[in-house]
Amino acid sequence: MDFNPIIFSIPLFFFLIGIELMIDQYRKTGLYRLNDSITNLNAGSTQQVFKIVVALGFYEFFYHNFAFFILNGLSGVFCFFLF
């Protein structure tokens, strides 16, 4: 599986949103809209979950329909370490 920096940056996004909110409340500008931030985070999280579900679905489909052979028991673990 490839390294995906977006997954690791989500806690940073929450932290930065909190800082934005505190700065806006301190300055009393009223420019910060929490609902927009929550919507953007939901869209990003949904995209990541959907990508994982689709990838697993394709794997499952190709495994059941196009597999040349099936590894049973410890043979899969052996092949993993052999590789």
Image (cartoon, rainbow, N blue to C red):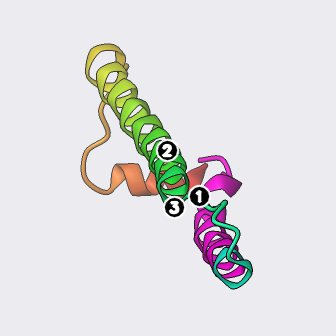
Q: Are marks 1 and 2 in contact (CB under 8 Å)?
A: yes
Residue 48 is labelled as 2
Q: Position of residue 24 (x, y in %)?
A: 68, 74
Q: Is 37 rendered above or below residue 9?
A: above
Q: Are marks 3 and 1 in contact (CB under 8 Å)?
A: no
Q: Nearer the viewer, mark 3 or mark 2?
A: 3
Q: Nearer the viewer, residue 57 or 22?
A: 22
| Cα distance between the residues tagged 1 and 2 | 8 Å
**Secondary structure of residue under mark 3:** helix
Classed neighbour count for the residue bearing mark 2: other residues with Cα under 10 Å, few (<14), some (14–19), many (≥20): some
Dot 3 or dot 2, earlier in sequence? 3
Residue 34 is labelled as 3
Q: Position of residue 29 (x, y in %)?
A: 70, 69
Q: Position of residue 36 (x, y in %)?
A: 53, 50
Main SS of residues in magenta: helix
**Secondary structure of residue under mark 1:** helix
Judging by the rendered image, the residue that carries numbered circle 1 is 7
Residue at point 33%, 29% (across, down): 57
**Secondary structure of residue under mark 2:** helix
